[in-house]
Image (cartoon, rainbow, N blue to C red):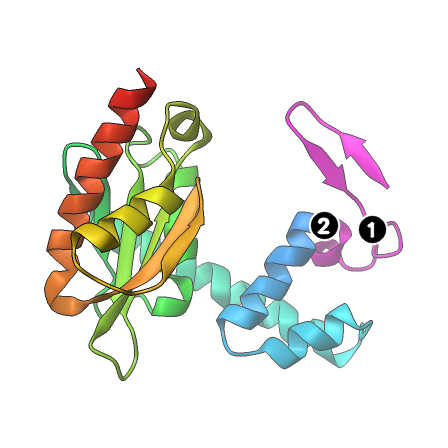
Amino acid sequence: MCFLNRYDYEYIFINETRHPELLEASEFAYLLNSCGKTGNASIGIAIAMGDRNKSIIEAKEILKKYREKLEKSVDWILNQHKLHKLEFVQYFYGEDEIPEEIIGTICSSLLNSQLIDKTKPIFGYADKIGEDFYKVSSRATLDLINSGVNLAEVIKVALKLTNLDSLGGGHPPAAGTKIKKELIHEFLLNCNKIVKKQLSWKR
């Protein structure tokens, strides 16, 4: 069953009234995502297959800790002034605080908040465990997309300009790749140049 609100559709699972975390489709997806992002995919799979006993209890605790981690990470970025700005993009490095598994989620959380500049796409990067690479994620608002920004193209062209053969891409509002650590700043500068061109072409 779905209900039309002002902006979009809400999908309600009418048999999940006992568990608010599962009642609305986006919240259900968020809970499953929290399991996957924290190394508890088997619990998410069990819930998706119908377990409403032990697994849902464990998942609720995972979701609580996951939300606390996201909130802590966002606070760390803002309070420690970890968000840096170029002319057309902004970015942050997760350091020892933010693991690669949630770097994209943190980008989304920041951009969906009222706490940062929404006129620039945001890029986040985090250490890939055991590799000399950073995982890079990027996000852009709908207004930026309507103004000409396409992050999938930004990532692909920036990789080429940085002379990297890494795979990368995604969608206009969300894209990512992995970057050799010594090339991260060159890559970000190239992303800045491409976003500038995209915005100028649209105008």
Q: In the rendered view of the protein, which quadrant contains the N terminus?
A: top right
The vertical placement of 183 against 74, above or below, is below
Quarter residue 28 falls in: bottom right
Tell me: 23 left or right of 72: right
The residue at 20%/47% (across/down) is: 83
The vertical placement of 145 against 65, above or below, is above
Local secondary structure at mark 1: loop
- The first of marks 2 and 1 along the sequence is 1
- Badge 2 vs badge 1, beta-carbon distance below 8 Å: yes
Residue 110 in sight here: no
Hey, what amino acid is under mark 2?
Ala
- Mark 1 is surrounded, within 10 Å at the Cα level, by few (under 14), some (14 to 19) or many (20 or more) other residues, namely some
In the picture of the structure, the residue carrying the numbered disc 1 is 13
The vertical placement of 12 against 4, above or below, is below
- Residues rendered magenta in the picture: 1-23
- Mark 2 is surrounded, within 10 Å at the Cα level, by few (under 14), some (14 to 19) or many (20 or more) other residues, namely some
The residue at 44%/40% (across/down) is: 173
Place of residue 21 in the rendered image (x, y in percent of width and height, measured from the top left): 69, 57
**Magenta residue check for 5:** yes
Using the image as rendered, state which of residue 200 and residue 86 is in the foreground. 200
In the picture of the structure, the residue carrying the numbered disc 2 is 25
Tell me: 123 left or right of 173: left
